Image (tube, rainbow, N blue to C red):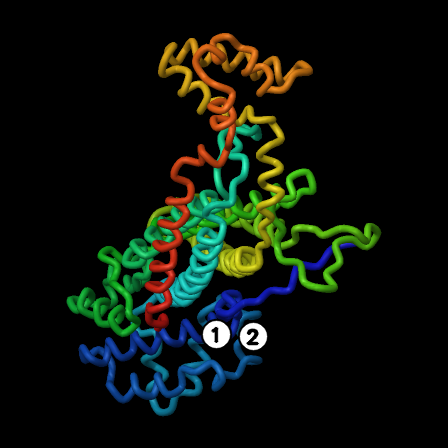
Amino acid sequence: MQEQPTALRVPDPRVRDLFTETARWQSWLDVEVALAHAEAELGMIPQAAAEEIERKARVELLDRDRIVESLRVTGHGLVPVIWELDRICEGDAGGYVHWGATTQNITQTGQLMQVRRAHRIFLGQLSGVLEAMADLAERTADDLLPGRTHGQHALPATFGFKVAGWIDELSRHVERMRTAEPRMFVAMLGGGAGTMASFGDQAFELQALYAKRLGMRPMPVPSRTIADHQAEYITLLGMLAATCSKVGFEVYTLMKQEFGEVEEPISEGTVGSSTMPQKRNPKLSQDIMAAAAQLRSIVPLALEAMQTEHEADRTTSVMMGRAISDATGLTGDILARLDQLIAGLSVFPERMRRNLDLSGGMIMSEALMLELGATIGRQRAHDVVYDAAQEAATGEKTFRELLLESHELRDRLSPEQIDELLDPARYAGQCSAMAREQAALGRALAAELRALPEAP
């Protein structure tokens, strides 16, 4: 039986809605309007034509059946839309639609406008995730658990420390995404081969006006072979997905009965299995990991799409277009699920503490070694504690019993001192401080993201 994904609580518009056929056509029309007005401002086409183009450049005014039929005949995505806009414009205005431009100028710029709207949604979703993580880090700042390295108990830590790491990493992703904005959201207007020949001496001024109307920057060199900015953005989304997947995998692992330290939100009535009634499966975290793996697999495609032959090649533009639409859709899905996962995560400190004690105090070996090393040297102390730990792991006596029998320790530390050194609560380092600091920083960044204006 194929299990259904957990129902999502999504506070923002769905990113996938931005990349429907209707939305794609409207983005192209918006770019054509910006082009017409920029050209009219420079006297390249009549002002009245630009105004009429703007009046009619609404997808609901177009005859969809005509466009679909023209698409079947021409095999060209944009031309049927241009023909239909030309047809419904009154007077001679339609003859000035798409003046001097080439298809990629319009379609690539239009898609980047769609991505810009998706980008703003991502930042809003990250605001929610950071706020939820800040609450979680603060709430669990002192909740002790076994810190694990290489899958084994290493040193005591707190769950809030784990969350602090997530906040820190996500904060850098936000910074990368914000600093990429001026490189990513650029308007292209170079004409057929990117040479600007169709626009004459006014070419750069025209592209600047066109870009300004779209709220974008003009491309310094509007070559149709340039795609590094798009590949960079997809790579950033791939990195963001990797962090989200890491969080999902940690929850997935700690939710296993053998750990029992957390549980993702499971609403009443949720069914984990068609045959095993007891199952409480981690659906959100698995969905995050699966979508993140798909997104990361798109990054190599984007890098391949940078390698365009000569001055243009449909192959690479098709590849990049697909990479962008797929990567943005997956990112929206991942962040929506991550928000729900973190906001509803249950944490079980009592189980964490029981797990912390599973090694019978051996997790405190470093603290014992350093205390003993102050009198007999670090390496000799390491050997003493090592011998006791290895014997405890393979023999019948407990770690504490072996420590008390060691003359090296017995001569230097009292039983009371050894018991203090075996207390994990005394050796969690700066975990609580880092959790609280990152909670404050995450909350501040979330507020900053919420205050951003809506995308044009």
Tell which residue pokes out farthest to the bottom in this image: 91
User: From the viewer's perspective, is residue 106 above or below residue 440?
Assistant: below
Tell which residue pokes out farthest to the right in this image: 275
Image location of residue 192, percent across then percent down: 32, 61
Marks 2 and 1, how far apart at CA: 8 Å
Image location of residue 210, percent across then percent down: 26, 71
Residue 286 seen in the current view = yes
User: From the viewer's perspective, is residue 117 above or below residue 391?
Assistant: below
Residue at screen point 43% across, 61% down: 122
Residue type at mark 1 is: Pro
Disc on the earlier residue, 2 or 1: 2
| Residue corresponding to mark 2 | 68
Q: Nearer the viewer, residue 128 or 37?
A: 128
Give me the disc on residue 57: none
| Residue corresponding to mark 1 | 80
Quadrant in the picture for residue 428: top left
Mark 1 burial class by Cα count in 10 Å: few <14, some 14-19, many 20+: many
Query: Does residue 399 appear left or right of residue 115 in this picture?
Result: right
Residue at screen point 52% across, 14% down: 386
Query: Does residue 21 appear left or right of residue 310 in this picture?
Result: right
Circle 2/circle 1 CB separation < 8 Å: yes
Mark 2 burial class by Cα count in 10 Å: few <14, some 14-19, many 20+: some
Query: Does residue 267 appear left or right of residue 100 in this picture?
Result: right
Label 1: element kind: helix
Residue type at mark 2 is: Val
